[in-house]
Amino acid sequence: MTAITFQPIAARPAPVKTEGAVAWIKSNLFGSLGTALGTIAIALLLLATVPRFLNWALVNAVWAKDYDACHTAVGACWGVVAEKFRIIIFGRYPFEDQWRPLIATIALLGLLIVSCMRAFWRPALGLLWVVVLAFFFTLMSGGVFGLAKVDTDRWGGLPLTLLLASLSMSMAFPIALVIALGRRSKLPAIRSVCTIYVELIRGVPLISVLFMASFMFPLLMPQGFSIDVLVRVLAGITLFAAAYMAEVIRGGLQAVPKGQIEAAATLGLSYWQTQRKIVLPQALAMVVPGIMNNFISTFKDTSLVTIVSLYELTGAMSLALNSDANWRPFKIEGYLFIALIYFGFCFSMSRYSIWIEKQVNKSKQR
């Protein structure tokens, strides 16, 4: 019998670490020669520009509400934000009653945050929307409970931006859903009407829609009949956003395999049962990024209502600076402040979209 001699196997190299900051930097910033060169170029550009920007924005900046110091400073003048803060945030709303839009804005923001939390996705959430919106309009317009009456043309700033964005997006979604289903209908009349609506709205810019809603639509109304400008603008933004969102949803509907619909038919499900239980859940899950992109676009497009004399966040900032020659030269600081607010809301919506994608894709994870 031949003796068996034990031969140890040579040690193998340790596995490469694929988690952690160092592994991420190696993989994403220095994964290849081209990536490494791009990383170095961007780093050099940042080193050349960031220190200068920080010196202008922070080190040499003026923070006090002193326009004489701002005119002689070599840095930014953030005192303009401190001086015009209330006008930028609340627009032309009466100064002594600006506590009302403050409370109304907090209530609306709270409603939006609650609506994004899965634990509150209950039928009672719809009732909460009705209550909070009624509270918002009552507090903003006044005329009851001893509150002074404030017309909608004096609403402005952040409250108006949030109101237009939240209401237009929430109303545009069901309209877009119906339009998207209508464009795939087998009935020629319904399909033609929905197609004409989408092509007509997408064929003109939002400025034209707002102009028509604000100035042309009242000319078509009977003598003595008038619709509030805020309602007309809100309807215009809603219809515009719904047309674009309908195409996003239609793309998701077309991506659902035909076999899913045929399987639902073999089970005896009706058309609406098939759409509600089979098609729409899959279609909407696939187009979450597109829908959120539409939401973000709508939020930023509210800045266009300035052309119809509704001074939302951006319009209120321009109004605050154009009416005061002492602070007018510091528009850059004002626009940076507005940009920071827009970025905060848009970035939050983007991160929420990523969370929604993870939730709807759990069924595909193994």
Image: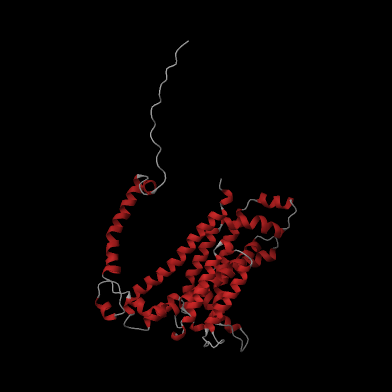
In this view, the residue farthest toward the top is 1
Q: In this view, does 41 lie above or below 173?
A: above
Which residue is painted at 32% across and 55% down in the image?
42
Which residue is painted at 52% across and 85% down in the image?
151
Please indicate whether residue 85 sits to the left or right of residue 269 in the image: left
Residue 309 appearing in the image: no
Please indicate whether residue 51 sits to the left or right of residue 35 in the image: left
Q: Is residue 242 above or below residue 270?
A: below
Q: In which quarter of the image is residue 70?
A: bottom left
Which residue is painted at 47% across and 63% down in the image?
348
Q: Which of 242 and 345 is in front in this view?
A: 345
Q: Is residue 255 above or below residue 305?
A: above
Question: Could you tell me which quadrant the C terminus lies in?
Answer: top right
Coloring scheme used = secondary structure
In this view, the residue farthest toward the right is 268
Where residue 110 appears, x then y in whole percent?
52, 70
Where residue 86 appears, x then y in whole percent?
41, 79
Q: How many labels does the image show?
A: 0
Where residue 67 appears, x then y in whole percent?
29, 80
Residue 54 appearing in the image: yes
Q: Nearer the viewer, residue 272 or 58?
A: 58
Please indicate whether residue 333 sits to the left or right of residue 97 in the image: left
Where residue 217 appears, x then y in whole percent?
58, 80
